Amino acid sequence: MHRNRLRIVVVGGGIGGLFAANALIARGFDVTVYEQAPALSEIGAGVFLTPNSVRQLQRVGLGPAVEKAGARVGTGSHYFRHDGAPIAPVQVTDSVGWNATFGMHRADLVELLAAALPQGVVRTGHRGTGFEQAGDVARVSFANGATAEGDIVVAADGIHSELRHYAAPPSRPVFHGSVAYRGVLPHQLIPHWPTDRWMMWLGKARHFLTFPVRAGELINYVGFVPADAEMKESWSAPGDPGMLRSEFEGWDPRIGALLSQVQKTFRWALYDREPLPAWTTGRLTLLGDAAHPMLPHLGQGANQSIEDGMALATILARVDSNNAPTALLAYERLRRERVAAVQRGARENGMRYDSSYTDLGVRDAEIAAHAAFRRRLYDHDVVPEAEAAAVALMRVVNP
Ligand code: FAD
């Protein structure tokens, strides 16, 4: 293995921070992850992994763990109108037909990412609150009074990032008027539910999604509905299963049957931010939702954060501490355009999913045609382009 002992401080032990730590350690860096929570944990909900990120998970040796903990989603996946009338198949492979789309329980994904890290890499109970840099040292301070120094700092502390303002111009999260009720149900409660497919029903201002997780033992559901003022303010809170059921009354009876089993649920207000013009300053850069929070309507937030981590590790592998700030800028330049396109694409897809069209025939045709966008998204491999960016960078720093 190529040894490269840049010291890297990652703030945030979510999917983005933990994958970045795996990719950076695979390149020989000295990495510490600081997580605010007293223990690594995740909410009881699913996340959908697509070929563009599964390719990167495989590169760090996590392919078998994903296959074991996930549920492969196959070609029976479909979009329906609210009453169950079929619209179009869902694209689940890349252009060459590689099926690497998995439903995962978020806790399973966090656990497998953390389990792959050497002992002592993750330090919990550290909430990053401050950043400073002087010469070739970058320093984070934590609410518990501790500090950590490195050659660079990667803020992967999510949509509410506390370190973001050190690296990016101020901006406010944009609220999109809806909330997502999320949860998982044991498959034995709904034994006829398919365990091999992603299914989504589209109605006026609402849509409903299910996919399997944990090898099909659990079915993940998400109900997207309009929000009231209180929901907007609370970001996330326990939800009322009765309210969730009433939101989808009169829809495909399959949804009613599933929701009749829900005993508890959680809801999230849906926010994103406008794409950032820049997210790096000197030895600090952002990653994942801290840099580019997006609506969940392409299921790409976690997938893009995984691409970020691999891009960062690939570019940094070529440089020493002196050149690290230039490398961080190259990483940001490489990622900015792609994630902005995905952020915009997620907003557009939300309009389709919530049936914000006067002619639903047009919407249905767009849903069918959107498979081409997904194929391009899934075909993407961030490594070759990151290698090319790194080579170009070296020509500049070592002419
Ligand atoms: P987070 O997961 O938010 O992790 C940030 C971590 O940093 C957390 O552990 C937090 O505790 C920690 N932290 C925060 N502040 C500090 C601090 N100051 N100091 C130290 N630690 C801190 N994405 C997909 O790819 N596929 C999907 O199917 C999908 N479905 C979604 C459905 C919904 C309803 C929503 C809302 C999102 C969905 N996403 C999906 C998006 C995905 O969840 C996020 O994009 C992804 O989790 C981002 O990872 P992250 O590590 O950047 O941020």
Image (cartoon, rainbow, N blue to C red):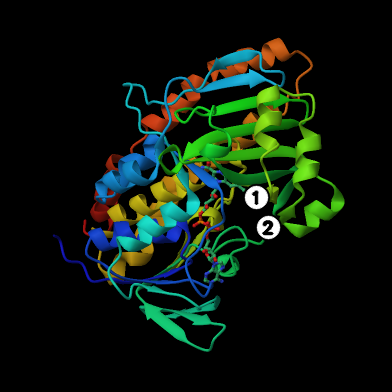
The amino acid type, in three-letter code, at marker 1 is: Arg
Question: Can you tell me whether the CB of the residue at mark 1 lies under 8 Å from the nearest atom of ligand 1?
Answer: no
Residue placed most toward the observer, 116 or 278: 116
Residue that protrudes farthest toward the right in the picture: 229
Tell which quarter ligand 1 is in: bottom right
What residue is at 60 percent from the left and 27 percent from the top? 200
> Is residue 386 in view from this perspective?
no
Residue that protrudes farthest toward the bottom in the picture: 145
Question: Can you tell me whether the CB of the residue at mark 2 lies under 8 Å from the nearest atom of ligand 1?
Answer: no
> Pointers 1 and 2 in contact (CB under 8 A)?
yes
Which residue is identified by label 1? 273
Q: Would residue 275 be found to the left or right of residue 323 on screen? A: right
Q: Would residue 213 be found to the left or right of residue 343 on screen? A: left
Which residue is identified by label 2? 171
Query: Dividing the image into 4 quarters, which one contains the C terminus?
Result: bottom left
Q: Which mark is residue 97?
A: none
What residue is at 36 percent from the left and 22 percent from the top? 95
SS at mark 2 in the image: loop
> Is residue 182 in view from this perspective?
yes
